[in-house]
Image (cartoon, grey):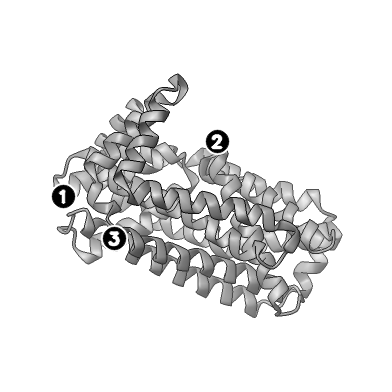
C-alpha cells in the first residue's frame, strides 16, 4: 500500500517542478528590480480577496461535481468523502490530464463499486462542459474590443455547434459518423461513442444546462480573482480592466488545454503574462507580477490543499490507480 501511495505521489512531481520553474522563469523574463517594486507596492488586501474568490470558485465546482455524480446515478458517496476527494483531486491539476481522470475515476469506482468506464464518463462529461464554458469567458472579454469581434463570432459559432452536437443526438451521431471515416480520428471517435453510450443521461438538457451554468459561474469567479489582482497593482476598477481579465484568462486557459503540458502549466503562465503585457500597454513587469500573484492566489493555494488531502484518496485507490495509469 505504501509503495502504491508513493507511486501516486510521483505522478505529481513533474507538474510540481514545472509549476515552480514557470514562476521562476517568469520573474527572470521581467526586470527583477521592476517586478520587486511592483510586489512592494501591491495592495495585499486584494490578494486576500483573490483567495476568497478562489474558495468560492471551488465551492461552485464541488457543487457541480456532486450534481454530476448524482445525475450519473452515483449517489452513494457520503458528503465528507466527496469533499475529501474533491480537495485531494486539486493536487491532480499538476498531473497529466489522462492520469488526472484515471485516478479520479478509479477512486469513485472503488468507493462505489461502479464500473470504471461509467465513472470515467462522468468526469469526461464535466471536462467537456468546462472546456466549452471557458469559451464563454473569452467571449465576455472579446465583446469589449470591437477589433476582436470576428473572433467573437467564430467562438460563438463554435459554442453553438458544440451545444447542438451534445443536445441533438442525430446531429451528434452524424458528426461522429463523418469523423470516424478519418483514420487519424477513428480511435478518438470510438472513445467518444463509448462515452455518450455510457453516460447519455448526463447530456440531457437539464443536467447539462446546470453543469454549463455552474462552470460559467466558476470561470467568471476566476476572472474576478484576476481582476482583484490587477486592482491591487493600481489599475482602475472599470469595465475595460474587467474585460481584460475575462479575455486574458479565457484564452490562457484555452491555450493550456490545447497544450500537452500537465495542467497546461507553463503555457498558461506565459499566455497570461504575454496577453496582459499587450493589453496593458506593453508593461511586461506589471504583467509578470500580476501573473505570479494570480497563480499564487489560485493555482498554488488549491494545489497545497490538494497535497494536504492527497494521502486519504491515494491510499484508497493506490494499487488500482497504478495499474490503470500504466495501461493508459
Q: Which mark is residue 260?
A: 2
Q: Earlier in the sequence, mark 2 or mark 1?
A: 1
Is the Cβ of the residue at disc 2 closer than 8 Å to that at disc 1? no
Against 84, residue 20 (above or below) is: above
Residue in view at x 66 percent, y 72 percent: 242
State the image quarter where residue 190 is shown. top left
Q: Position of residue 114 (x, y in %)?
A: 16, 44
Against 66, residue 317 (above or below) is: above
Pointer 1 residue? 112
Q: Which mark is residue 132?
A: none
Instruction: Check disc 2 and report its element: helix, strand or loop.
Output: loop
Q: Position of residue 13 (x, y in %)?
A: 50, 40
Q: Is residue 273 visible?
A: yes
Which quadrant does the N terminus fall into?
Answer: top left
Compute the Cα span from label 3 to label 1.
21 Å
The crowd level at tag 3 (other Cα within 10 Å; few <14, some 14-19, many 20+) is: some
Name the one closer to the observer, 326 or 70.
Answer: 70
State the image quarter where residue 117 is shown. top left
Front tag of 3 and 1: 3
Residue in view at x 47 percent, y 64 percent: 216
Q: Position of residue 265 (x, y in %)?
A: 58, 45
Pointer 3 residue? 207
Residue in view at x 40 percent, y 22 percent: 181
Against 301, residue 199 (above or below) is: above
Instruction: Check disc 3 and report its element: helix, strand or loop.
Output: helix
Q: Is residue 207 left or right of residue 48?
A: left
Residue in view at x 62 percent, y 73 percent: 47
Q: Earlier in the sequence, mark 3 or mark 1?
A: 1
Compute the Cα span from label 2 to label 1.
31 Å
Amino acid at each position: 500500500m505504501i509503495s502504491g501511495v508513493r507511486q501516486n505521489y510521483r505522478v505529481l512531481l513533474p507538474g510540481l517542478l514545472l509549476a515552480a520553474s514557470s514562476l521562476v522563469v517568469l520573474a527572470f523574463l521581467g526586470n527583477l528590480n521592476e517586478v520587486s517594486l511592483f510586489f512592494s507596492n501591491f495592495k495585499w488586501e486584494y490578494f486576500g480577496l483573490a483567495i476568497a474568490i478562489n474558495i468560492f470558485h471551488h465551492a461552485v465546482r464541488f457543487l457541480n461535481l456532486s450534481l454530476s455524480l448524482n445525475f450519473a446515478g452515483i449517489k452513494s458517496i457520503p458528503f465528507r468523502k466527496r469533499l475529501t476527494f474533491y480537495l485531494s483531486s486539486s493536487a491532480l491539476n499538476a498531473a497529466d490530464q489522462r492520469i488526472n481522470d484515471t485516478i479520479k475515476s478509479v477512486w469513485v469506482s472503488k468507493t462505489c463499486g461502479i464500473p470504471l468506464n461509467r465513472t470515467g464518463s462522468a468526469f469526461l462529461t464535466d471536462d467537456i462542459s468546462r472546456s466549452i464554458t471557458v469559451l464563454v469567458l473569452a467571449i465576455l472579454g472579446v465583446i469589449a474590443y470591437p477589433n476582436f469581434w470576428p473572433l467573437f463570432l467564430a467562438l460563438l459559432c463554435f459554442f453553438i455547434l458544440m451545444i447542438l452536437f451534445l443536445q441533438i443526438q442525430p446531429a451528434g451521431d452524424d458528426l461522429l459518423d463523418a469523423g470516424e471515416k478519418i483514420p487519424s480520428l477513428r480511435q478518438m471517435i470510438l472513445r467518444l461513442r463509448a462515452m455518450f453510450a455510457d453516460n447519455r443521461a448526463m447530456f440531457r438538457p437539464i443536467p447539462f444546462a446546470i453543469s454549463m451554468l455552474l462552470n460559467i459561474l466558476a470561470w467568471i469567479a476566476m476572472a474576478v480573482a484576476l481582476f482583484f489582482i490587477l486592482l491591487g497593482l493600481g489599475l482602475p476598477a472599470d469595465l475595460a480592466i474587467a474585460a481584460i481579465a475575462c479575455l486574458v484568462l479565457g484564452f490562457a486557459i484555452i491555450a493550456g488545454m490545447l497544450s500537452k503540458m500537465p495542467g497546461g502549466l507553463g503555457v498558461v503562465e506565459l499566455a497570461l503574462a504575454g496577453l496582459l503585457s499587450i493589453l496593458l500597454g506593453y508593461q511586461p513587469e506589471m504583467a509578470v507580477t500580476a501573473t505570479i500573484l494570480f497563480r499564487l492566489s489560485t493555482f498554488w493555494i488549491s494545489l497545497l490543499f490538494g497535497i494536504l488531502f492527497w494521502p486519504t484518496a491515494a491510499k484508497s485507490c493506490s494499487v488500482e490507480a497504478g495499474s490503470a495509469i500504466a495501461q493508459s
